[in-house]
Image (tube, rainbow, N blue to C red):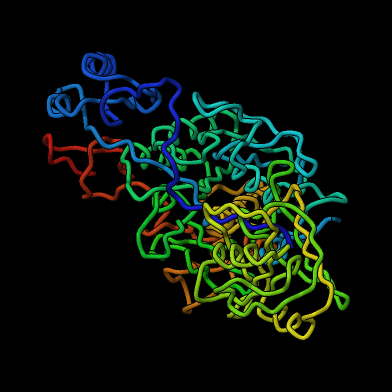
Amino acid sequence: MFYRVLFGLVLSVLCAVSVSAPPGERYIVQFEDGRGAAGRAAVANVGTVARDLARHNAVAAHIPDKALAGLRRNPNVAYVENDAKRFLHTHAGGQEQPYGIGQVQADQVAYQASTPQKICIIDSGYQQGHEDLPTADGTNDPGTGNWFEDGYGHGTHVAGTIAAVDNSVGVVGVIPGTTDLHIVRVFGDSGTWSYSSDLVAALDVCEANGANVVSMSLGGSFKSRTEQRAFGNAYNRGVLSIAAAGNDGNTRKSYPASYDSVVSVAATDINKSLASFSQRNDQVELAAPGVGVLSTVPMGTGSHSVVITPVENYDSVAMDGSPNGSETGTLVDCGLGTSTCPGGGGQVCLIQRGSISFADKVLACQAGGGAAAVIYNNVPGMLYGTLGETVTSIPSVGTSDKIGDDLLPQVGSASTVDVAATNYAAWDGTSMATPHVSGVAALLWSNHSTCTNDEIRAALAATAEDLGEAGRDTSYGHGLVQVADAVSYLDSNACGGGGGGGGGGGGGSCPLLPVGASCSLDAECCSGKCKGPSGGKSCK
């Protein structure tokens, strides 16, 4: 087993380039048609422009509170909205095929390089030169660093699920070794948050570089009209955007995943059950593996662990925060590890999960002179744990309830706990589910290159393995994505066989506003016509 990292969604604030941040909160200012120049001048008079969204007749700017009301009343301004933050959606030897590759049937379908489909990954970067990743191209975003570097690791993990090379090391991706990738880096090395306007700009870069599929393992709780319109327009131009449903384990919607023009992806585990953290709502469209997903991370930042006894070598997962090291000692049963474990020093502490934190268990082992700690689960399945902010000096690992039962009769024997650095890690999150679907979409599209994005989306929905309640539901959407079945479906039915659109929550093939809906701009409406008095416009 390889190391799993458990991340929170909100960490520290993303560092700015300068010491002092521009005054005021950050907003998107949308201008009236034909009034962009005057609108930009009005914004410049009261605030600081952070990003020009020229293609969308808007800017993102830091605006003082006292200037907001006046700017909203300016006749050149259509609306002013908060520039919503976007977060990464990670829940915190020889080659191995991750379980998700088989579950989505990617090992049954060959990629057609003669009809390539470019995948644009918007994330935290990419480690160019990794032993198990192909050469890619990309674009730097101001303030986040080089696209070909990844101090956080999230983007490299996502990319590995899509494209890890089929060689003698590491893992294998949905489309092994594809170089049809474009990387846009919008998160810095802290992996904290970006803005919806940054995502809009990144989407523009993806399109400009020929992306067919846009993969976004990220999101946030607040909508942005500018962002919604941008993804709707990109969809109408033929781009298929795919995003993580979110990791809060509730029924809230995350954006951009919950726009009708974006495919929202839920996370399942190795048993095809919904992950406890996966958000559930009527915008969830497809599901894919997102628990314990093994993939690439920047070289040397992952961890591999094993527990060795005279009987067998046992799978384990290093505790998040465990130091590397190999320690051998007498295996001692320390119960729940709530107090100093006896053993005379140098022992390997065997501890059951429960009562206190993993960190406190390891500290109790360490205080009694223990050389290493093995914590086994008290419920079925492998134990993936974290030491949080606690610093320990001994290697510590988690393992399953079954392995714990196997180890107990071996108390008193010499045992070894080995934790070593590696280039791979098993992570949780709808972030990890999303690249499975992105890769599958491109894989399917390469086999049916004359299909539209709407037809590819419909085929994926029609052939997904139904999980949970019969039919589409709020947990799994249409179900677990199945690329071989989708290829066969289009082989039999041709591109038009899907009946038009996988659909977000609104049905039909148009992801924009229907006739009668309130609107601000023509581009928001399926009809392309937003008419009526100021403050009372609707799609006509």
Query: Residue at (21%, 18%) from the top-left corner?
Result: 46
For the residue pair 532 and 497, the one nearer the viewer reads as 532
Query: In the picture, which quadrant includes the C terminus?
Result: top left
Query: Residue at (58%, 68%) from the top-left corner?
Result: 361
Query: Residue at (12%, 34%) from the top-left corner?
Result: 534
Q: Position of residue 484 (x, y in %)?
A: 70, 63
Instruction: Determine if residue 492 is in view.
Output: no
Side of 252 where 458 appears, left or right: right
For the residue pair 125 and 334, the one nearer the viewer reads as 334
Side of 129 where 228 appears, left or right: left
Q: Position of residue 50 (x, y in %)?
A: 37, 23
Query: Residue at (69%, 38%) from the top-left corner?
Result: 180
For the residue pair 177 and 185, the one nearer the viewer reads as 185
Side of 72 where 248 appears, left or right: right
**For residue 466, above or below residue 301:** below
Q: Position of residue 329 (x, y in %)?
A: 80, 68
Residue farthest to the bottom? 409
**For residue 366, above or below residue 118:** below
Query: In the picture, which quadrant includes the N terminus?
Result: bottom right
